[in-house]
């Protein structure tokens, strides 16, 4: 990473961390986080472990596929990806122990643990293995030839809506619309079952705009069908205040497909979660494998460039870390007193 890019990344990270804290303190006062110990006391490694992700073409699927490949190659565990419409769909399986891990953003993990927001019941067994990708970025995408030049121009346009098994997409989309005062009643709502259908609907002429992550295969695919463009979000005190309500911030996008000129998008952490149904040895073995083979992971997909050793044990986590992961992070020296204090804070 070039020095200028590194400074920009650090500034972005600090901005998000600072914005995230007030929202976390409010949220934690409203809902209780379960911090029970791991229930699986076995010391055996499973023959197979599954990672829940969003559909193929998404960032979550790319990350899960990379993690599964490296785990299968370097440990006795055969890891595989299982695709769902989103965490809302696979969270019950994580809770029951039918799924070992899943790729999830920081807001989804908190809401799932506490049964708030998009989750109608709590899933208290969720635990974090890795702080993951930071920042993961999302924005509002339109056809490049569209007359929609800014977020405010979405009024009266058709927007992908609902997103089925990944309801957080609707929350994030509403938030980005809010940065320029666009309400849900201002747009035509076209219901889609997942993110892929929403973004493909732009090229197919079914919708005028949709939320999408940046730098994912889906964007490449759709852009090849019909050139697309991400709208630039306003980078103001008010828009960052709006983004901060869910632990996000407005960040400047790096050059990637669909980004034309200076473009501001939404940034937030994307995590790897597990559960108390997974024993400590399994969690430790997998996290160690990914730590030791980070260089290989970073050749698999560009998102792993933001899956760094510095982001594995973040200090602003909203859900407790898995004790097996904590063991590894202590051994490599990145788990500190700040992490213990944060655990105590969210578990008190």
Image (cartoon, rainbow, N blue to C red):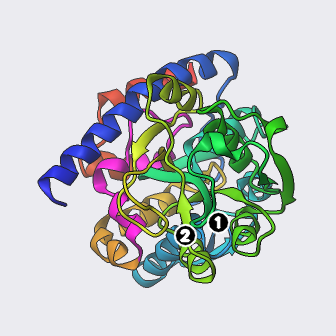
Q: Nearer the viewer, residue 44 or 154?
A: 154
- Residue at horizontal 65%, vertical 39%? 177
Left or right: 51 as drawn, with respect to 286: right
Q: Which mark is residue 187?
A: none
Residue named by callout 1: 53
- Residue at horizontal 71%, vertical 67%? 202
Q: Residues within 10 Å of mark 2 (few under 14, many from 20)?
A: many
Q: Where is residue 29 drawn, in percent x and y?
A: 63, 15
For residue 312: magenta? yes
Identify the element where label 2 is drawn: helix
Q: Nearer the viewer, residue 243 or 340?
A: 243
Residue named by callout 2: 64
Q: Which residues are magenta?
A: 301-326
Q: Where is residue 206 drawn, in percent x and y?
A: 81, 67
Left or right: 193 as drawn, with respect to 309: right
For residue 82: magenta? no
Q: CA distance from mark 2 to mark 1?
A: 6 Å
Relative to 90, is 14 above or below?
above
Quarter of the rendering containing residue 308? bottom left
Identify the element where label 1 is drawn: strand
- Residue at horizontal 36%, vertical 63%? 255
Tell which residue pokes out farthest to the left in this image: 3
């Amino acid at each position: 990473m070039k020095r200028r890019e590194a400074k920009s990344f650090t500034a972005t990270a600090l901005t998000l961390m600072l914005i995230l804290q007030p929202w976390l303190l409010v949220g934690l006062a409203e809902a209780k986080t379960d911090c029970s110990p791991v229930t699986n006391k076995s010391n055996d490694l499973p023959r197979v472990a599954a990672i829940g992700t969003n559909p193929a073409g998404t960032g979550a699927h790319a990350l899960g596929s990379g993690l599964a490949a490296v785990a299968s190659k370097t440990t006795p565990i055969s890891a595989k990806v299982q695709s769902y419409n989103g965490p809302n769909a696979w969270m019950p399986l994580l809770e029951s122990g039918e799924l070992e891990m899943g790729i999830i953003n920081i807001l989804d993990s908190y809401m799932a643990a506490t049964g708030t927001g998009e989750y109608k019941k709590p899933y208290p067994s969720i635990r974090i293995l890795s702080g993951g990708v930071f920042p993961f970025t999302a924005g509002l995408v339109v056809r490049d030839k569209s007359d929609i030049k800014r977020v405010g121009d979405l009024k009266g346009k058709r927007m992908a809506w609902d997103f089925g098994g990944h309801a957080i997409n609707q929350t994030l989309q509403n938030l980005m619309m809010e940065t320029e005062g666009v309400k849900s009643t201002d747009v035509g709502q076209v219901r889609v079952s997942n993110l892929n259908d929403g973004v493909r609907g732009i090229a197919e002429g079914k919708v005028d705009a949709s939320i999408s992550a940046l730098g994912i295969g889906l964007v490449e695919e759709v852009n090849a069908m019909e050139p697309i463009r991400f709208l630039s979000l306003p980078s103001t005190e008010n828009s960052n205040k709006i983004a901060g309500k869910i632990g996000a911030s407005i960040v400047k996008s790096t050059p990637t497909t669909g980004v034309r000129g200076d473009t501001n998008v939404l940034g937030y952490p994307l995590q790897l979660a597990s559960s108390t149904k997974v024993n400590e040895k399994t969690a430790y073995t997998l996290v160690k494998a990914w730590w030791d083979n980070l260089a290989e992971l970073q050749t698999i997909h560009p998102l792993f460039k933001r899956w760094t050793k510095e982001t594995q044990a973040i200090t602003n986590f909203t859900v407790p870390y898995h004790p097996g992961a904590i063991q590894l992070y202590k051994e490599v020296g990145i788990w500190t007193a700040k992490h213990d204090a944060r655990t105590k804070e969210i578990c008190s």
